[in-house]
Image (cartoon, helix red, strand yellow):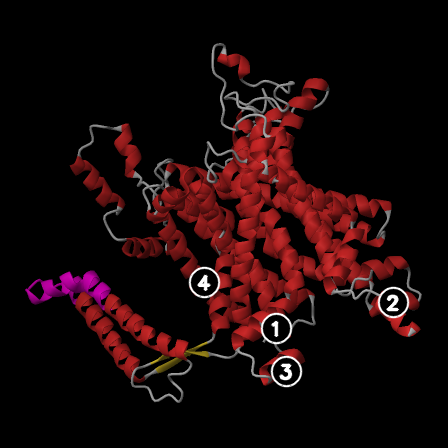
Amino acid sequence: MFTYTIRRLLQMIPLLFAASIVIFTLLALQPGDPLDELRQQNPRITAEQLEQLRRAYGLDQPIYVRYFKWLGRALQGDFGQSRTYASPAGQIIFGQRLPRTLVLSGAALILALLVAIPAGIFSAVRQYSWSDYVITFLSFVGFSMPIFFLGILLLFLFAVWIPERVPWFPKFPVQSVSDFQWVQVLRGEITFFQFIWDWAFKLVLPVLALSTIQMAAWTRYMRASLLEVLNQDYVRTARAKGLSERVVLYKHALRNALIPIVTLVGLAIPGVFGGAVITETIFSYPGMGRAIFDALIDKDYNVAMAALAFLALLTAVFNLIADLVYAVVDPRIRYS
Amino acid sequence: MAAVATTSKQKPQSTWTLAWRRFRKHKAAMVSLGVVIALILIAIFAPWIAPYSPTAQPTGENLADYYFLGPTREHWLGTDELGRDVLSRIIYGARISLLVGFVAAFAAALLGTTLGVIAGYFSGRPLRFYVGPFAKAAGGWRPWPFALWRVVSWVLFYGLLYLAADLAWKLSGANAQALFSGTFNLNNLLSLIGLVLAWGVLLLMAGWGLFGQGKIDLDVIISRFMDFMLTIPELPLLLVLSALLRDTQGVVGQWADEVFGESASVFIIITIIVLFGWIGTGRLIRGAVLSLREQDFTTAAQALGAGEARIMFRHLVPNALAPLIVNATLAIGGAILTEAALSFLGFGIQPPVATWGNMLTNAQEYIFTAPWLALAPGFMIFLTVLAFNYLGDGLRDALDPRSRL
């Protein structure tokens, strides 16, 4: 197991190296360079000044030279300067944006699990019942629902339509970032409870939108996985021993049924981070996904590069974690 | 005689007849099949069905009277911010969505199957990849495609070596020259050492290239490539690729613009969806082929002298057809969803071509004043994807030989 982990970690290095080369090249080849905007803002800028700036940004060098320079600095934690925010790109992405995306994606993942696992169990235990059909139908609806349409729909319903008709209904905010900051709690201006409540209230809609697809997909997997396990011989043996249905279900069947779910959840986590681009765009949530989107539009490639490299690392790490956890929870799996 | 008569009465039932009988029992899938067929008909006959042109804007005086109309008798789904008829745009949007869905899913399935079957079939059996001009290899010139590749590979190999040597010179040549003309410093010295080392290695490789032979396991290459593609964050990379390829200054964008005109972005979007879409199929087919190739029928085909291509595509792929069809059906829905997401973010199919995705982008701005604009395109995307998902589910049950009638 230990040697396997080390080997996988070593294999990750060339993989990430290749991924970063591809991402860097694609960003460097993007149409129009960052100087275009400058040229528009200031028509009197001379060719000489432009040339100087080009040299200052390192744009006069070929792509591979720029890549290796970027890599050397990135490995030391320097991701270059952001042009739009006029501060280090690493600080924007990892200091400001990543924590917000962690909160959003983390809440969405937890909500999805909290709903999907009980719903899947319920659905499997009462297979072909009325409630099973309803849950199955809802999960089909859930993962066929485009996240951007769901987002717009939620906004319209909970921020406009219902509050207009039901006077006591809380009007959910369109902008989903709290006005309160953590420092205010430390300073004693607001209570901790107020802080959490404000955030929670503003996160309800984006979290709902982001979690729906995973919720629906995991419900289906949970149901299928549990049904398969319930048909196994050892479940029949457990029942034949006269164990109560409760013990059979939760001690014998569920533990085994959860094994494939562990892998699925591990593999889905990077996707949720990447998928947050759409959710964050709809709900004006200044997280990492929104930062990537804005950076691509503003041609602020240092920011985009830092975020995308991080996402690639995240994917590789979670692929490894999924495989390792799989071996931990299932003793039948042995890596050599 | 009577016995013969009774046996001839019973119709022979092929796999497909049985599958169809099972499929018909799946009510949701049958309804979905109806929805999909209806959508295809709408897409094909769009010019005859649509009451207006999808890009027609009102003319005359009091233009503002025609903007943001709610549902009326003339405009069943109302009009948008430019006074265009929403129903007509929805009908024309079906063309784009279905085109993107079917073409992208089909191309991805084709690419994924080809690479997957090659990876699975040749796994653990390294193929001759390079045989130098003077290498002593038995049967080094057979079969003829390999002989051709052998010659081509020399050109590629030495061409690559030349490029590497040239690159080394461009990177450090100037500094090394400066060293000989008297400017002695660490940077120049390191450049010279690097240059000598690089050229030395290249010279060794050139020597090896004359006599050496190389073998390569295609499975390792393809599987590693799939792993690599899975590491790349998909949605952001789709945005990056889309911006890059749609650029009309670039080579691809220019070419697509000339060939496809206004719908160049449709072609580009299909391409980038395929670029990421084949991996699922590839893994599926590789896994299936790895087990199928060990079965007796494959050995029988080999013993009968069937060629490798014949074994792969006539014996192995047809046996993996059931999961392949299910996968491709679900992929259609996935491709439609991806296209809509890209168009919604403004990185997909560009106006004036109407798609459900880019209609939703515009509608989002007016969600508080004209909410019905968002409902129609959003609901159509949802309905289409739902139909393909149910269709895939029905096919999975129908094509599974273990499921009973």
Give the x, y percent position of residue A246: 87, 57
Residue receiving disc 2 = A236
Local secondary structure at mark 2: helix
* Residue density around tag 2, few if under 14, some if 14–19, many if 20 or more, within 10 Å: few
The quadrant in which the N terminus of chain A is found is bottom right
What residue do we see at 39% from left, 46% from top?
B245
Whether residue B348 is situated above or below residue B299 in the rendered picture: above
Local secondary structure at mark 4: helix
| One can see residue A110 in this view | no
Q: Marks 4 and 3: CB-CB under 8 Å? A: no
Give the x, y percent position of residue A152: 60, 31
Q: Amino acid at mark 1?
A: His
What residue do we see at 13% from left, 63% from top?
B185
In the rendered structure, which segment of residues is drawn in magenta?
B165-189
Q: Marks 4 and 1: CB-CB under 8 Å? A: no
Q: Amino acid at mark 3?
A: Ala
Front position among marks 2 and 1 = 1
Q: CA distance from mark 4 to mark 1?
A: 34 Å
Residue receiving disc 3 = B300
